[in-house]
Amino acid sequence: MIYADNAATTKMSEAAIEKMVSLMNDTYGNPSSLYRFGQKAKEALEEARETVASVIGADPKEIIFTSGGSEADNQAIRSAALIGKAKGKTHIISTKFEHHAVLHTLDKLEKEGFEITLLDVHEDGLVRPEEVAAAITDRTALVTIMYANNEIGTIQPIAEIGRICHERGVLFHTDAVQAITHVPINVVEQNIDMLSASGHKFHGPKGTGFLYAKKGIKLSNLIEGGAQERGKRAGTENVPGIAAMAVALKEASDKLDETAKYLIEKRDRLIKGLSEIEHSALNGDAEKRLPSNVNFCFEGIEGESLLLLLDEKGIAASSGSACTSGSLDPSHVLLSIGRVHDVAHGSLRLSLGEDITDEDIDYMISAVKEVVTYLRSFSPIWRDLVAGKKQFIL
Amino acid sequence: MALYSEKVMDHFLHPRNVGVIEDADGIGEVGNAKCGDIMKIYMKIDDDIITDVKFETFGCGSAIASSSMATEMIKGKPVSEALELTNKAVAEALDGLPAHKMHCSVLAEEAIKNALEDYQSRKKA
């Protein structure tokens, strides 16, 4: 099998598995217990916190561990909303193509009386810093913009947006779930106040993640209970998972440049090959995108059938079609960059892992070409397009 | 558990009756590209018997499988019998569809009814 869905989740690193198993076997004490056996687990937890903090240029006290990216997003946004509300600031700025962990939290806040502005991301899938600046008012409590998009992989001008927020005295949160370990992140240099990350996207275990919140930002709890995580996240810590996440994060971050260089070459080979398919288009900017991300629309076909046929050929991929999202609408990300419904249904995301080879890339190119041609051969839309009864969009 | 039954996968991977009938006696088309499903059914009818049927479908796996199964169920059958084909019968013949995919079987029923209406209105004219 060629696993080309690394934006969905990744294979765990061997070093991370080793760390996890060793802690589960030998260090199962509760980090809140005062005896030595518990304190050993506490040490593992704090060592992980130091590792995570050092990778993103933060202080260990600024890191709290969560169950993943969604929880971190929820907590960051809720906390900033409450901080703002206390000062009479009830306006939040975000974008149309955020992850649902952000968008659905904002929907709820809107119902609770907050005013939400969702910025356009244009055809290239990039937020314009000047549009962020123009949207900020004296009532703005928070700007939350993802570092890199999960479907089309476009990398946002985060440092610049952060600088604007700081000039205007507005908190800035970024969902860095897709970006971390793929692009260099330093929260101080890049003017980031809060950042969310998820362990299983960088070869760590599922059910782990963290939230960075700059010193002085008062976090509100989503989970009430004991005093774990400095009282900000109750519940006995997932020590083996957290420690394994830290190992995976360090490992992937240490070889970031090397991996990026390798993947960009593979990514561009794949983009070049798929571009040969007529009436297709790359989604998102060709350069300001994650080294691992390729996302295309193919006119005249539907994404789910494309995925099933690729699965038959041993390729695991993803699509933004309605049928794969379980709703009637195709991906909100593709609609946000101006793809119309007809075309957005025929999308394919291939997200590469570090073990991908040129042979894999070439196999995927020929498999996608074959499947697209086959599906078009009995697509009534394609027939109408070719017959000139309908206009090609791509 | 897999997303689809073996029957659905069989009809999706090896669809029966794919294609076009150039001199069709009835053509039905339902769905729209906006929703991500279009089904087009072509029929050749002699003496009120469906002697041949072909389909073209733009849609997901279950839409393609439903088209394939539905065309198989009416091929060689009298028009009166084909008119009675229900979406439920198509779904059952496929050993079931996931709840959110039942509309694919509805499309197949509607496409067939649509083609038969086209045939009957042509006959009157």
Image (tube, grey):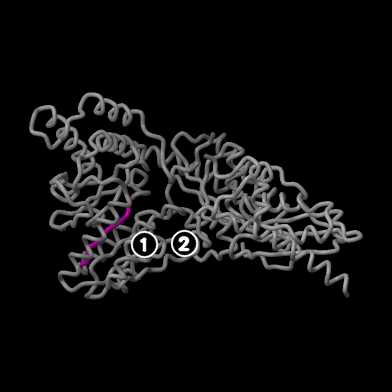
- Which residue appears at 34% of the width and 55% of the height? A147
Circles 1 and 2, Cβ within 8 Å, touching? The answer is: yes
Using the image, determine if residue A49 lies above or below residue A221: above
Residue designated by label 1: A103
Same chain for marks 1 and 2? yes
**Mark 1, chain letter?**
A
Quadrant occupied by the N terminus of chain A: top right
Which residue is drawn at the image coordinates 85% and 61% (left, top)?
B24
Residue stretch rendered in magenta on the structure: A170-176
Lower sequence index among marks 1 and 2:
1
Q: Amino acid at mark 1?
A: Leu
Instruction: Say whether residue A15 is left or right of residue B19.
Output: left
Between A391 and A291, which is closer to the camera in this rendering?
A391
Q: Position of residue B12 (x, y in %)?
A: 66, 46
The prevailing secondary structure element of the residues shown in magenta is strand
Q: Which residue is mark 2?
A: A332
Q: Residue A146 in the image: state x and y as whole percent.
A: 35, 57
Residue A153's tag is none
